[in-house]
Image (cartoon, rainbow, N blue to C red):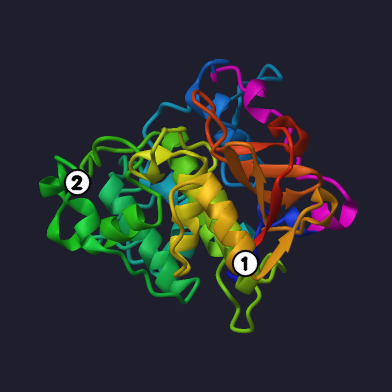
């Protein structure tokens, strides 16, 4: 049986390879190839669909005429959620029987999702009730959060820990079921949920929304240490964890003064938040962060050619993470979501390095 720790290579985890090849991790615009994804769809403009397709998380359906559809705004079913998580695990469908091997009585023979249901049942990622798993039912956000924490515990062998006080800022947090509160708190803490004004725990997520959550979750899994200070991506997490955390928020809106997944981020707010997650407190100002780096950083460089992956790069009024190949990642400007851009776009290089 294929080990569940075999990972599908994501853009984030491929950055080390990109560095070795001397280029940034570029992604084709797959979203535009789906006939039912409008050019102005948020998941198209943010690049979320492209990332999810690149990572093998989502796939389209053949329309029978040489075109593909994605159904980005359709609710995701429990079977589809199991299938996407099976892909993140890197599990091979061929290792799981096409015959129902679970105790669930509502998995008819011949269904496309049987291998994923078998995998999810075996790993404990998906549990049913009274013998029913309801594969065709839409999955609610709180049910999905619970699936992710079960994956984290049973497949990634990592404890999910979240701060329940993070839920207090949402007007509908009282709708979260008691059994789902720890999972929802973890999902909000990690930036998987909570990017909007409401949590909507009892509502189902769309396929596009699920893709965004799973891109963040997949990056989180990629950044988990294997016990020796390294991650599945081959990147040393002891020195690059701040940038890996920041990369989870690709596509999040720019918000002047923002410094959290709930509000969105400005440039120094994203840096401050990412470093806070590894226990380093920084001021909420690009200029103040630069001065602090000069005085107390682990390394400080004045030539952009000396930047290393994970370094902060400072420009007049701006700060971002260097991700190799002449590219920086960060909260860029009003109207542009957190994303990568060419280093020379941001003007004079003032210095960089790591805390």
At 55% from the left and 20% from the top, the residue drawn is 37
Q: Nearer the viewer, residue 332 or 225?
A: 332
Query: Seen from this angle, which residue lies furthest bottom?
Result: 228
Question: Is residue 178 shown above or below 214?
Answer: below
Residue 169's label in the rendered image is 2
Rounded to the nearest whole Å, what is the CA distance between mark 1 and mark 2? 34 Å
Residue at the spot 60% in from the left edge and 37% down from the top edge:
339
Residue positioned 31% across, 40% down in the render:
138
Specify whether 347 is left or right of 127: right
User: What residue is shown with label 1?
Assistant: 297
> Is residue 259 a member of the stretch shown in magenta?
no
Q: Quadrant for residue 344, please give it.
A: top right
Seen from the viewer's position, the closer of residues 309 and 119 is 309
| Magenta region | 17-37
Instruction: Judge whether 248 appears above or below 137 on screen.
Output: below
Q: Quadrant of residue 327?
A: top right
Query: Viewed as shown, does residue 141 lie left or right of 164?
Result: right
Q: Residue furthest left?
A: 174
> Element type at marker 1?
loop
Q: Residue furthest right?
A: 21
Residue 263 image offset from top left, x and y in percent:
34, 39
Q: Nearer the viewer, mark 1 or mark 2?
A: 1
Q: Say above or below: 354 vs 207.
A: below
Is residue 28 located in the magenta-colored stretch of the structure? yes
State the image coordinates of residue 351 (x, y, percent, origin top left): 71, 51
Note whether residue 26 is visible: yes
Q: Is residue 86 visible?
A: no
């Amino acid at each position: 049986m294929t080990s569940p720790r075999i990972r599908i290579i994501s853009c984030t985890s491929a950055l080390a390879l990109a560095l070795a090849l001397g280029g940034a991790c570029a992604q084709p615009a797959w979203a535009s190839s789906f006939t039912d994804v409008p050019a102005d769809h948020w998941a198209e403009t943010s690049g979320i669909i492209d990332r999810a397709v690149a990572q093998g998380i989502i796939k389209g359906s053949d329309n029978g005429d040489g075109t593909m559809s994605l159904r980005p705004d359709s609710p995701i079913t429990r079977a589809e959620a199991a299938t996407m998580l099976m892909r993140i695990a890197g599990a091979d469908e061929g290792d799981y029987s096409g015959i129902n091997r679970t105790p669930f009585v509502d998995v008819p023979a011949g269904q496309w999702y049987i291998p994923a249901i078998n995998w999810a049942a075996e790993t404990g990622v998906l549990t049913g009730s009274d013998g029913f798993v309801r594969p065709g039912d839409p999955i609610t956000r709180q049910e999905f959060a619970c699936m992710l924490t079960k994956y984290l515990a049973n497949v990634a062998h990592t404890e999910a820990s979240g701060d329940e006080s993070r839920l207090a800022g949402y007007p509908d947090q009282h709708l979260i079921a008691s059994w789902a509160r720890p999972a929802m708190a973890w999902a909000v803490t990690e930036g998987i949920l909570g990017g909007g004004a409401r949590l909507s725990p009892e509502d189902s997520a769309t396929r596009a929304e699920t893709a965004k959550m799973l891109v963040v979750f997949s990056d989180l899994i990629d950044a988990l240490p294997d016990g020796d200070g390294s991650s599945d991506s081959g990147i040393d997490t002891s020195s690059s964890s701040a940038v890996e955390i920041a990369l989870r928020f690709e596509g999040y809106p720019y918000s002047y003064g923002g410094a959290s997944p709930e509000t969105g981020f400005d440039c120094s707010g994203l840096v401050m938040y990412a470093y806070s997650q590894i226990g380093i407190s920084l001021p909420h100002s690009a200029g103040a962060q630069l001065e602090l780096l000069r005085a107390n950083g682990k390394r400080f460089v004045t030539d952009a050619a000396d930047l290393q992956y994970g370094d902060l790069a400072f420009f007049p009024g701006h700060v971002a993470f260097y991700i190799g190949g002449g590219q920086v990642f960060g909260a860029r400007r009003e109207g542009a979501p957190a994303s990568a851009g060419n280093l020379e776009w941001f003007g004079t290089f003032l210095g960089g390095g790591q805390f």
